[in-house]
Every structure is written in structure tokens, then in C-alpha cells.
Amino acid sequence: MRYLTAGESHGPQLTTIIEGMPAGMPLIAEDINNELARRQKGYGRGRRMQIEKDEVQITAGIRHGQTLGSPIALVVENNDWKHWTGIMGQEPLDDPSSEAVKRKISRPRPGHADLNGAIKYGHRDMRNVLERSSARETTVRVAAGAAAKKLLSLLGVELVAHVVEIGGVKAQNLSYSSLEELREVTEESPVRCFDTAAGKEMMAAIDEAKKNGDTIGGVVEVIAEGMPAGVGSYVHYDRKLDGKLAAAIMSINAFKGVEIGIGFEAARKPGSQVHDEIAWEEGRGYFRKTNRLGGFEGGMTTGMPIVVRGVMKPIPTLYKPLLSVDIDSKEPFSASIERSDACAVPAAAVVCENVVAWELASALVDQFYADRFDTLKATIEEQRRTARDF
Ligand SMILES: Cc1cc2nc3c(=O)[nH]c(=O)nc-3n(C[C@H](O)[C@H](O)[C@H](O)COP(=O)(O)O)c2cc1C
Ligand SMILES: C=C(O[C@@H]1CC(C(=O)O)=C[C@@H](OP(=O)(O)O)[C@H]1O)C(=O)O
């Protein structure tokens, strides 16, 4: 499967086209809207999330609630567009007194895509970079991921994301060691972190950052349960599924690190405390006695829960900006200020969950015959049986 997205942050709408989703799978707008709503929650976001109420329009590929096997097109409108028509219009810029010319951006923000994007594409107005590099694009990545998540759920694969820490404050109830505990995690999981005593500390840290014109980041974790063993491959670097997950997380705006299982901690432990002993039981098949490797060996799933963590850096736009250089005068100046979030870690957790869902669903569709959903389901059930009795 593959998908592309199009759309600017303050343009009329965002679009994604999904290719390769099997035919005959139930999918309705509500499946996608639930995920879009989850992505909009959280403490520390700017005013934009109050302006938007993200809802999908399905414009192709689905009829009477079922996928057709043809490309699926999903559109989400930007409510904010109506405030930006002067700046984001299609007409050529020949009036020097126009709003678009007056609001030209020439002072790149450290940590955002502004300067590198301007150099690469030759844009003297860095709004041309900002509009597409904005994480507004993650709206339709989540829409595509929601379709993948539905596919996974119908195949018995469930996943959930939660916040591990924000601004150095660790979340409570981190030990999702049993599958029962994982199932207890509700739809609200990425914002549940704020309901605890540690959550109040996180909120205070966000308030403090905001007061200082600063921003904070954090760590999120995605757990996926129910993937059959042997998905992915060891035979080629670009078929290793753990590598694809790492790339998917790193492709999310502001993500600077990925861990699978115990991740970086493995560097400080002997092999006997890193690798997971293998066992077999009638009815259950093979399993690992621990899951320190987070569900992967040799680029393939082990059948144990997949555990992936991602690190989000603090948001780059600062209300007390860092020093930068004006690209027109080459003089030092404070970087430009755009309306901005102080912390978007819970929203980013939902993005992580959905990009992981996309990679897992893609891996299943690519590995098993999948023009038809019913055939895919039967093949995967067969794979589970084969792996159990192998
Ligand atoms: C959900 C989400 C919301 C974000 N909100 C903002 C924001 O309000 N202001 C900002 O400067 N960056 C924001 N970012 C981060 C930037 O989009 C990101 O830092 C930028 O695209 C540069 O990419 P890089 O940090 O991956 O190098 C957000 C990221 C995510 C995932
Ligand atoms: C719009 C979203 O996030 C945006 C991501 C973003 C950035 O620079 O990445 C900057 C902000 O944009 P604005 O200036 O319009 O408020 C965020 O609000 C979203 O998540 O839907």
C-alpha cells in the first residue's frame, strides 16, 4: 500500500490518496473522524485547534461503507482558510501593497524547515516552506492511518499510543506489561496522562514554558498487539519492518529519536538481560518469556506486542525567539513568530499510533495476497495457525 498527501496548512484543504487497500473492507467516515478528533486533543496547543474541527470527506474509493479496491481519496477542510484567502490566494503577486507581500517571511525560525526549504526551492518568502512543512499535514496522515487501523482491527490487531513523558515529567501507570492492561487503555489514552498527579506537573511545565515564551517536548509509546509472527523480512534492508517503523516515526514533524523495546537501554545491559527466552505451549504456540526486544527479531515480528517509542523535540516557534538572520539584509534578527503550540506531545502520540498502523497494515497487505479483504483475512488466519504449530 502507499499514500500521498497534498495541502498547505492555511490553504483550503488537505487531501490524501490511498492505493492498495483491499476491496470489500468496511470503512465509514466515522472510523476516520474518531482518530481526527483524538489528534486535536491535548493541553498546550495554540488557538488553531479551536478554529478547526477536523472531519473527513470521502470522495473516492468507497461505496455503501465498503472499500472498492480503487484509490481512496480523503479530504479534510481547513476552517482557518477563510482567514487566509488574501495571503494564500492563487492569483499572481503583482500588487506590492497586497497582504501576501506585506506578510512575507524573511527571518527563518531555528529548528523549523524555513531556511533549508527556502535554499532548496529558491523561495525568498519562507511562507512557501512553512505552509507545507507544518504538522497540519499530519491530519491526513492520521486519516490514512485510521483506514489502516480499521483494517488491522478487523484482522485482530489492536494498537494504542500513550504519553511517556512531557518536559522531563514522567507519566504514571507506565507498565503495560500484560495484554489485559493494554486492552484497558481507552480511546483517550494520549490525553489520559493529564488526569494523574504527574499529569498536573506536566500541565504546570507546559504553563511555565508558555509563560517564558518557550516550548517543551516529550516521549510517546505505541503498543500493537496481535500481529502474526514472521511479518517483515530479514533478506533485504528495505524489507525489515522495524526499519520501516523507525522511518515512519522519524518522518513525523519534530521527532528526533526512535526506540524499539528497551531500545537505548540495551547498550548498557548484557545479552542475557536483553534477549527474550523462547517458549512453546499447546494452543498458544511460540512466545517469548519477556518482551525486551519489543516484538522484533531480524526485521520480522515475533508475534509478541510491538513496542515503539518516539522522542519529540520542543516546538521550534518560540514567542521569545532565538536569534536568526534576515535573508534579505543578512543582518542578525530575532526569528519570526507564528501562532504556535507550546507542547503538542499528546497530538503527536496519535500521529505515531496512526503511522505505525499504516506500516503494519501495509506489511500485511504486501506480504499476503490482498486484492480482497476476505482472502486477506483467511490467509492471515492460516499464517497464525502455521506459526503456532510450526
Ligand atoms: C502535532 C504537531 C504540532 C506541531 N505544532 C507546531 C507549532 O505549533 N509550531 C511549530 O513551530 N512547530 C510545530 N510542530 C513541529 C514542526 O512542524 C517541526 O518542528 C517542523 O516541521 C520541522 O521539522 P523537524 O522538527 O522534524 O526538523 C508540530 C509538530 C507536531 C507533530
Ligand atoms: C494546524 C496544526 O498544527 C500546526 C502545526 C504547526 C507547525 O509549524 O508544525 C504550526 C501551527 O500552525 P498555526 O500557525 O496555523 O496555528 C500548529 O497549529 C494541526 O496540528 O492541525
Image (tube, rainbow, N blue to C red):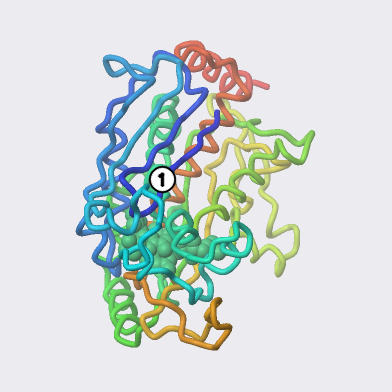
Image mark count: 1
Residue at 44% over, 47% down: 353
Above or below 171: residue 371 = above
Q: Image quadrant of residue 84?
A: bottom left
Residue at 39% over, 42% down: 140
Which residue is at the front of the view, 125 or 179? Answer: 125
Residue type indicated by callout 1: Gly
Badge 1: residue crowd in 10 Å (few <14, some 14–19, many ≥20): many
Above or below 32: residue 24 = above
Q: Is residue 6 visible?
A: yes
Q: Is residue 90 left or right of residue 280?
A: left
- Expressed as whole percent of the image width and height from the top left, the position of residue 371 reads 52, 13
Which residue is at the front of the view, 147 or 389? Answer: 147
Quadrant holding ligand 1? bottom left
Q: Is residue 4 left or right of residue 9?
A: right
Residue at 62% over, 32% down: 286
Q: Image quadrant of residue 210?
A: bottom left
- Expressed as whole percent of the image width and height from the top left, the position of residue 31 reads 29, 33
Q: Which residue is mark 1?
A: 7
Give the residue furthest to the right.
235
**Mark 1 vs ligand 2: CB below 8 Å:** no
Q: Quadrant of the N terminus?
A: top right
- Expressed as whole percent of the image width and height from the top left, the position of residue 238 reads 72, 39
Q: Identify the secondary structure beneath mark 1.
A: loop
Residue at 45% over, 69% down: 218
- Expressed as whole percent of the image width and height from the top left, the position of residue 220 reads 45, 60
Above or below 356: residue 314 = below
